[in-house]
Image (tube, helix red, strand yellow):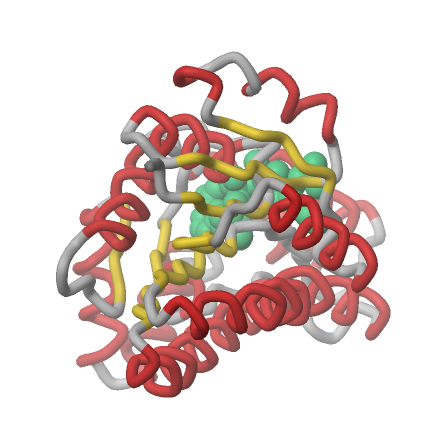
Amino acid sequence: MHQSILITGASSGIGEACAVHLAHKGFRVYAAARRVEKLRELEGLAGGRIAPLALDVTDDASVESVMARIAEDGATLFGLVNNAGISVMGPIEETPLEEWRRQYETNVFGLVRVTQAVLPQMRAAGRGRIVNIGSVTGRIAMPFQGVYASSKHAIEGLTDALRREVEPHGLKVSLVRPGFINTPFGHQEQEQLQNHVDAGGPYADAVHKFKLWHAKGHPTAPGPTVVAEAVHAALTAEHPHSRYTAPMSNVGALMLRNLAPSAVVDRILQRVAGLK
Ligand SMILES: NC(=O)c1ccc[n+]([C@@H]2O[C@H](COP(=O)([O-])OP(=O)(O)OC[C@H]3O[C@@H](n4cnc5c(N)ncnc54)[C@H](OP(=O)(O)O)[C@@H]3O)[C@@H](O)[C@H]2O)c1
């Protein structure tokens, strides 16, 4: 029997890589996202163990219909990979609350919605794994990434609380923190930063400098398989870590963030981003 897992945001980047990698490792993968036509490209791979499902994590009815479809198959989910995410970039002062809400509806409330839908069956089974995709920005908030970074900080906290709540029910919860990963994610971030530059205003010059630094990050970064390998470890290790960082080269920056005084970290990050 193949263990079944649900991956949100599987139509692109990290979610797609997780779907392919985990199906090759023997999991039955429910690959979910809004763009079903992209998911269909995965259907024939890995012995046909990838099933595409239409899912919008911001919509109650969509999540219910995914759960109904999985139940129709007679499957009980062993794993959930909460990967679906978007990024809102720009200065905090200039980002309308509507955009903050859009960010949180997907990255935070969407994750909670899917998790709440899956937990009853995992608890009833007395076993299961939940892997939340956070980010290095969930610990290190660069300037002009405050909206996105704060949503990933929220995921850090809720993952810790969830892990402690469900462990007595036999469930294990991990956070996987990617650093820069070469996926389409960076393109839309670049476009948003450019919009802020074009709009002018007091932060335009600094956003332009930050954009130049950010532009170097994604194209030179590793591909998403490095994250899929960490997700696989979180799903299969007897005693999974509470946190995985992928790639590991980001661990130094995280340690610096934890150990150095904020004033020092501020200066370093401003310099790294070309703002000083
Ligand atoms: N790439 C990086 O450098 C990086 C670094 C740190 C963390 N991350 C995190 O990794 C995750 C995946 O990012 P990625 O780089 O793979 O980006 P991506 O290539 O843009 O993929 C994002 C995925 O999220 C899905 N999605 C967005 N809104 C959704 C919604 N409302 N309902 C369901 N699915 C939705 C998209 O599918 P549809 O549009 O088809 O719905 C897509 O499959 C995100 O949580 C991101 O924050 C990425």
Horizontal relation, residue 234 to residue 28: left or right:
left
Location of residue 248 in the rendering, given as x and y in whole percent from the top left corner? 19, 49
View extreme (left): residue: 238
- The image quarter containing residue 160 is bottom left
Query: Image point 63% across, 53% down: which residue?
Result: 87
Residue at the outermost top position: 44
Figure check: 108 above or below 258: above
Location of residue 145 with respect to 233 vertically, above or below:
below
Q: Please give left or right for residue 229 compared with residue 252 in the image.
A: right
Counting from the top left corner in percent of width and height, residue 10 is at: 56, 37
Query: Residue 236: percent from the left, percent from the top?
Result: 22, 50
Q: Is residue 113 left or right of residue 31?
A: right
Question: Residue at the spot x=14%, y=64% of the render?
Answer: 239
Whether residue 154 appears in this view of the structure is: yes
Front residue of 267 and 191: 191
Q: Name the image quarter holding the N terminus.
A: top left
- In percent of width and height, residue 185 lies at 58, 39
Identity of the residue drawn at 67% across and 23% down: 38
Give 234 or 25, whichever is nearer the viewer: 25
Q: How many marks?
A: 0
Q: Would you place residue 97 above or below residue 78 in this image?
A: below
Q: Would residue 42 appear left or right of 217 to someone viewing this image?
A: right
Q: Give the residue drawn at x 63%, y 26%.
A: 39
Ligand 1, what quadrant?
top right
Residue 191 appears in the picture as rendered? no
